[in-house]
Image (cartoon, rainbow, N blue to C red):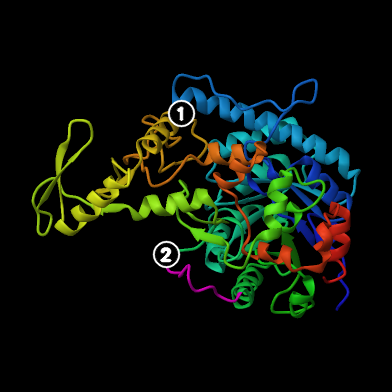
Amino acid sequence: MKAINAIRMGGVDVLPIIEGGKGIAVSNGISSGHWAASGGVGTFSAVNADSYDENGARIPQEYRGRTRRERHEELVAYGIRGGITQARQAYELAGGQGRIHANILWEMGGAERVITGILEGAKGLIQGLTCGAGMPYRLSDIAAKFNVHYYPIVSSARAFAALWKRAYSKTSDLLGGVVYEDPWLAGGHNGLSNSEDPAKPEDPYPRVAALRKQMNAFGLNHVPVIMAGGVWWLEEWEHWFDNPEIGPIAFQFGTRPLLTRESPISDLWKQRLRTLKEGDVFLNRFSPTGFYSSAVNNDFIGELRARNERQVAYTTEVIGEHIAPFGVGPRKRTVYLTPHDLENVLQWEAQGFVEALRTPDSTLIFVTPDKALEIQDDQIACMGCLSQCRFSNWAQHEPEYSNGKKADPRSFCIQKTLQTIAHDESEAAMKNNLMFSGHNAYRFGSDPFYGNGFVPTVRQLCDRILTGR
């Protein structure tokens, strides 16, 4: 195994191991502070981060506004307060070692306002901004305003070129690194394009080599690429070290920090990670963002999959094979199905899936009355946690605050499910909520490092990674 040396990043030398920022309350000030204290880059999530009262108790994010816009303002305020709280905690724990980064999703509701508020309230505590889930053109402007380095997350050389030409070339001195996130292996939301097949993973080496070639063409030979998604043992990436086709390289770990003593996820969640088998992490397109995402294939994903499979196309008048009348809703308004689809519908109704919900694509899905009520309640309670949400039809842009489409019952309230799994430690919460994970999580069960139920500290994990295994 080649020696793993420090790398220049954000103006300082750090170990080339980075904690990946993970959604709501999963990568926090404690985990990131300890990672930085180990000499690497700790990353806390600035997405609806937790804050605490004077007694140290978590403040539940409850919404009292009567309208979505009012609740959206509450969400932004929660996000700013929580991000400042986590930044302070991380900075204190790091003790001047490593680097502290804040991770945001460009498609989160009020992204610019939230990260600006956090940086204003935590001046000098955050050394870098990482950002993905969209095309964050304004990331460099925000970084320049506060003189912090920025780290865009991309999944292709083409995406980075677009960001560079439109915005980043003006603030190249603050570009601390470019995160290449493997869209087939990373956990959470993935950057698969319409031209890429989710069922046909591509080798990351040529894609990263293409990214490096593009960066070099822009004069960014010295700026590190950060490989994210699918990284477990560094010895498996040894051929990337000191490789001119790859250039300066660091590695991001998103999944492995979940199973540490400082990780804030529940013990049941940690135990579940040990039982995963290869293929248990499911690449799906149920997210209200419209992006693909990777999550554990639990009962929650199973219900969404079944909900989407109980789906038929309809017309509002007789067209082609759509000749079979069917009544929808309390008033039983007539739509037309194919005779074959009507047979399926009658079978679903016999199984209790008697509520037909319209989608924006002129289809119907069939669910139980309880599930229909839950979907309706979640849509009504929307607080605008995304810039645009296909589940509730919210969009944060004035004057309509709508994406112009019907709400889509094939999706779900992502804020609700991520808050629940992060803070509810019950078995039911583990089964019935979105559990993001990278596709390599099955390796917890076979890696001898975790044998006999061993749960390492963050420092022990970092030390282990630096051995190559």
* Front label number (2 vs 1): 1
Residue 309 visible within the image: yes
Residue tagged 2? 194
- The quadrant in which the C terminus is found is bottom right
Question: Which of the two labelled residues, at mark 2 and mark 1, occupies the earlier sequence position?
Answer: 2
What's under tag 1, amino acid-wise?
Ala
What span is colored magenta in the figure? 194-203
How far separated are the C-alphas under marks 2 and 1?
Answer: 31 Å
| 454 falls in the magenta region | no
For disc 2, the neighbor class at 10 Å (few under 14, some 14 to 19, many from 20) is: few
Assign a secondary structure to mark 2: loop
Q: Is residue 406 above or below residue 181?
A: above
Q: What residue sits 27% from the left and 46% below the top?
A: 350
Q: What residue sits 24% from the left and 55% below the top?
A: 344
**Left or right, 38 with reference to 217:** right
Give the prevailing secondary structure in the magenta stretch. loop
In the foreground, 3 or 442: 442
Residue 224 visible within the image: no
Q: Is residue 226 above or below residue 399?
A: below
Percent x, y of residue 432: 54, 44
What's under tag 2, amino acid-wise?
Asn
Percent x, y of residue 334: 13, 40
Q: How many marks?
A: 2
Q: What residue sits 74% from the left and 64% below the top?
A: 251
Q: Is residue 330 above or below residue 55?
A: below
Percent x, y of residue 438: 63, 60
Contact? badges 2 and 1 (CB < 8 Å):
no
**Left or right, 27 with reference to 210:** right
Residue tagged 1? 381
In the foreground, 84 or 158: 84
